Image (cartoon, rainbow, N blue to C red):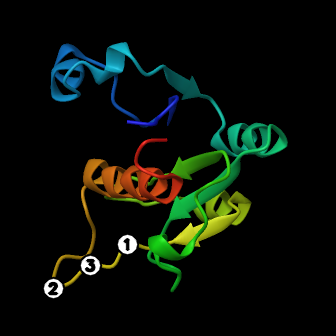
Amino acid sequence: AGVDAVIIPEKGSARISGDAVKTSAGALFNVPVCRAENLNSTIDFLKESGLKIVATSEKTDQLFTQVDMNPPLAIVMGSEEKGISFQLLKNCDELVKIPILGKIESLNVSVACSIMVYEAIRQRGLNG
């Protein structure tokens, strides 16, 4: 689906289990999953490597459709409970929000991530 890798924090994230592989419909066999000890250092490395860093946050008015996702890109997603730390948000190039109607305050991280990846693919042309 246009994703080259998934980076998850060493601490505080679930281990990859058989259930995770099943839920991913086997996608975990095709996409490398890396564990990062320090997410800020990882973001610095990605930026130095030429990637644009875009984070989802309710702390912005910029919609996810308003940011250019054509350059090489890393998308930062937070947990449903805690979101993304202030320090990590400061280290990102762009903050975007996914608008939500009704009384729901946040989306499941997998749903929000799917929306972000779809938007990046849409902007690049669905055929890549």
Q: Which of the two residues, 115 or 1, is positioned nearer the viewer here?
A: 1
Separation of disc 3 and disc 1 at Cα? Answer: 6 Å
Horizontal relation, residue 99 to residue 22: left or right: right
Q: Is residue 14 above or below residue 117?
A: above
Say what secondary structure mark 2 lies in. Answer: loop
Residues tagged 3 and 1 counted as in contact (Cβ below 8 A): yes
Q: Is residue 127 above or below residue 36?
A: below
Name the residue located 58 percent from the left edge and 70 percent from the top edge.
67
Q: Is residue 127 above or below residue 20?
A: below
What residue is pinned by disc 3?
100
The label number, if any, that marks residue 102 in the structure image: 2
Horizontal relation, residue 88 to residue 110: left or right: right
Q: Amino acid at mark 3?
A: Ile
Separation of disc 2 and disc 1 at Cα? Answer: 13 Å
Residues tagged 2 and 3 counted as in contact (Cβ below 8 A): yes
What residue is pinned by disc 1?
98
Say what secondary structure mark 3 lies in. Answer: loop
Separation of disc 2 and disc 3 at Cα? Answer: 7 Å
Q: Is residue 16 above or below residue 118?
A: above
Residues tagged 2 and 1 counted as in contact (Cβ below 8 A): no
Q: Position of residue 24 (x, y in %)?
A: 23, 28
